[in-house]
């Protein structure tokens, strides 16, 4: 989007804002709503690295016309009375994170944005610019860095500010896949589930997949997923045979990161594993890929192949341990910015003095 002009004002104190950015969601679980969402998402060159002309024909001639209805049915299966689960959780996280940061002495605005869909990242950045934000911290909802996700957020941020004259000070969080507070939040979520349902014979940690080609080209995502899994397993006291790391959501015919989640779960059932617990550490909010793909499709596959109990461990969502971890991660990157009440008061006093000097200078001329 092209930024609107903002009238410059002398003596306007700056503000600090945190933007929590998630992938996005269609506006409704309908084919009509899926078409623009899929087109925006799958037109991103970070997401699909196929020659543009060939992919344009596939996307607009096959995927958007024929996949929209099927995808809409999947979204309808998990849609809540409040709307898209991913959007609902992300908006709640942003609101609660502001309070958690406030309790730690950081008076900052925290807003949610979507890389695809609404509220769009450019529109949120435009609103912050209109409000006079002088420092903006971008917090991706992705613990593990990937060019397909985190770098795409960076692209959108930089594309927006290419058209802005007075750019705020920017900080972008790259990853937090091994942050102790994030690992602890995951550990607590598993233990809470085990306290309620007892411990399973096997824990499956399913991460969103990406094409294997991205790993060969140097994307660190695969390694960061495995590090998260290793640290969580250590925190839970698991042995190597107690858990598996798998990758889900394969799209297209190319080879993606393996092992794939559904075939792995089916193999566990055939080998006699009666119960599995499945969690998705790479997703910080429940969404289509966790609620429909894992908790419906993969569940059905496990039971069909001889399994007896399938337990899905929800994403961190608004869990207090996760919100505290988000505050830890964010506070680290706010260091040095004027976020305390004392710093904000001083900034306002300086702005008032600056305005007085500007008016005096204008009067003298």
Image (tube, rainbow, N blue to C red):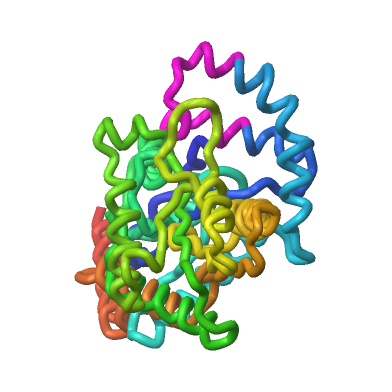
Q: Please give the name of the residue rendered at 32% of the width and 78% of the height, measured from the top-left corner.
A: 237
Question: For residue 108: magenta?
Answer: no
Spot occupied by residue 261 in the image (x, y as percentages of width and height): 51, 50
> Residue 117 falls in which quadrant of the image?
top right
In the image, taking residue 72 as reference, residue 116 lies left or right, namely left
In reply to whether residue 49 is colored magenta, the answer given is yes
Residue 359 visible: no
Residue 151: where, in percent of width, then height? 35, 42
Which segment is the magenta one?
Answer: 39-57
What residue is at 75 percent from the left and 43 percent from the top? 72
Q: Horizontal placement of 283 versus 37: left or right?
A: left
Q: Position of residue 319 (x, y in %)?
A: 51, 78
Q: Residue at left 45%, top 15%?
A: 51
Q: How many numbered callouts?
A: 0
Task: Out of 184 and 206, give the one closest to the viewer.
Answer: 206
Residue 358 is at least partly visible in this image: yes
Q: Residue furthest left?
A: 336
Query: 352 or 106: nearer the eye?
Result: 106
What residue is rendered at 32% in x and 47% in y?
A: 222
Residue 229's x, y, as percent?
A: 34, 62
């Amino acid at each position: 989007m092209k930024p609107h002009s903002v009238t410059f004002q002398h003596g306007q104190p700056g503000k600090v804002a945190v933007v929590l950015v998630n992938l996005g969601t269609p506006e409704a679980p309908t084919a009509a709503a899926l078409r623009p969402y899929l087109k925006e998402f799958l037109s991103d060159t970070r997401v699909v690295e196929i020659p543009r002309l060939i992919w344009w024909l596939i996307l607009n001639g096959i995927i958007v016309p024929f996949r929209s209805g099927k995808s809409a049915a999947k979204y309808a299966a998990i849609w809540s009375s409040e709307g898209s689960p991913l959007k609902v959780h992300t908006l709640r996280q942003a609101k609660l994170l502001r309070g958690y940061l406030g309790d730690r002495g950081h008076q900052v605005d925290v807003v949610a944005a979507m890389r695809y869909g609404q509220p769009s990242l450019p529109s949120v950045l435009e609103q912050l610019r209109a409000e006079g934000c002088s420092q903006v911290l971008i917090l991706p909802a992705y613990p593990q860095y990937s060019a397909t996700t985190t770098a795409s957020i960076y692209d959108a941020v930089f594309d927006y500010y290419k058209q802005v004259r007075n750019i705020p000070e920017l900080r972008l969080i790259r990853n937090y896949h091994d942050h102790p507070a994030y690992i602890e939040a995951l550990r607590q979520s598993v233990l809470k589930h085990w306290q309620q349902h007892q411990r399973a014979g096997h824990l499956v940690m399913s991460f969103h997949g990406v094409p294997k080609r991205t790993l060969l080209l140097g994307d660190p995502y695969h390694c960061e997923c495995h590090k998260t899994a290793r640290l969580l397993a250590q925190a839970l006291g698991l042995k190597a045979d107690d858990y598996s790391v798998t990758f889900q959501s394969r799209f297209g015919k190319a080879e993606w990161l393996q092992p794939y989640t559904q075939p792995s779960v089916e193999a566990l059932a055939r080998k006699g594993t009666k119960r599995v617990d499945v969690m998705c550490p790479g997703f910080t909010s429940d969404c289509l890929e966790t609620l429909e793909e894992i908790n419906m499709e993969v569940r059905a596959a496990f039971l069909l192949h001889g399994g007896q109990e399938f337990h899905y461990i929800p994403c961190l969502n608004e869990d207090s341990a996760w919100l505290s971890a988000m505050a830890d991660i964010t506070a680290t990157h706010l260091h040095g910015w004027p976020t305390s009440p004392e710093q904000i008061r001083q900034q306002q006093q300086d702005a008032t003095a600056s305005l007085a000097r500007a008016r005096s200078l204008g009067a003298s001329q």
